[in-house]
Amino acid sequence: MRIVVAALASLAVAACATSPEPADGPLSLAVEAGVPAPAQARFYADCIAQAAAAWTYDRIDTTIRFQCDGAPARAFYEGLAAWSASGGAEVTADGRTWRFTQKPQRDPSGLDYCWRESDVHRCTVVLTVGDYLER
């Protein structure tokens, strides 16, 4: 089971990468070589793995939202400290401190984020998967 969860987490993190706009011309099945993921990719993988194992995920349109808590969420939240503070992506409201992976414009929809309230930590990782979910 652990191997399956780890594989799912790896696939989900890899699928988060943005793909370029389709080019004119024939379809090419050449797959671009990847590079090692940076250390912070582990926060995503750990959160997704916990959510997959606990079935704490849902969908909105063509995205899947993975929600984790406990140790993976605390590590992700703490890992976002410098990034969120320097990029204007940390918000405190109603007793919670929210840290986003990018500056929110209107609301948290579609964004990856973590929040802390007292000693409770929770994170949401959003994976865009495309029209396949609409079937």
Image (tube, grey):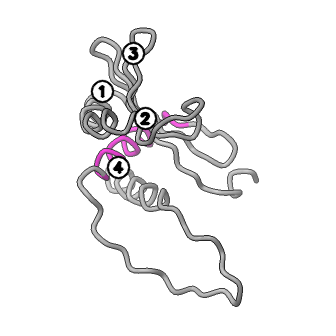
Alpha carbons under labels 3 and 2: distance apart: 12 Å
- Please tell me which of labels 2 and 4 falls first in the chain: 4
Q: Find numbered disc 1 in the image and state the secondary structure of the residue it sits on.
A: helix
Bounds of the magenta segment: 41-57
Q: Quadrant of residue 37?
A: bottom left
Q: Find numbered disc 3 in the image and state the secondary structure of the residue it sits on.
A: strand
- Please tell me which of labels 1 and 2 falls first in the chain: 1
Q: Find numbered disc 4 in the image and state the secondary structure of the residue it sits on.
A: helix
Q: Could you tell whether 109 is left or right of 11 in the image?
A: right
Under mark 2, the amino acid is: Tyr
Alpha carbons under labels 2 and 4: distance apart: 14 Å
Alpha carbons under labels 1 and 4: distance apart: 14 Å
Look at the picture and state if 18 lies above or below 40: below
Q: Which residue is mark 1?
A: 70
Q: Is 133 a magenta residue?
A: no
Q: Which residue is mark 4?
A: 45
Q: Could you tell whether 37 is left or right of 114 in the image?
A: left
- Please tell me which of labels 1 and 3 falls first in the chain: 1
Under mark 4, the amino acid is: Ala
Which residue shows up at 46% across the image and 55% down it? 12
Q: How many marks?
A: 4
Residue 108 location (% of width, % of height): 54, 32
Alpha carbons under labels 4 and 3: distance apart: 24 Å
Q: Which residue is mark 3?
A: 96
Residue 135 location (% of width, % of height): 76, 53
Q: Nearer the viewer, mark 1 or mark 2?
A: 2
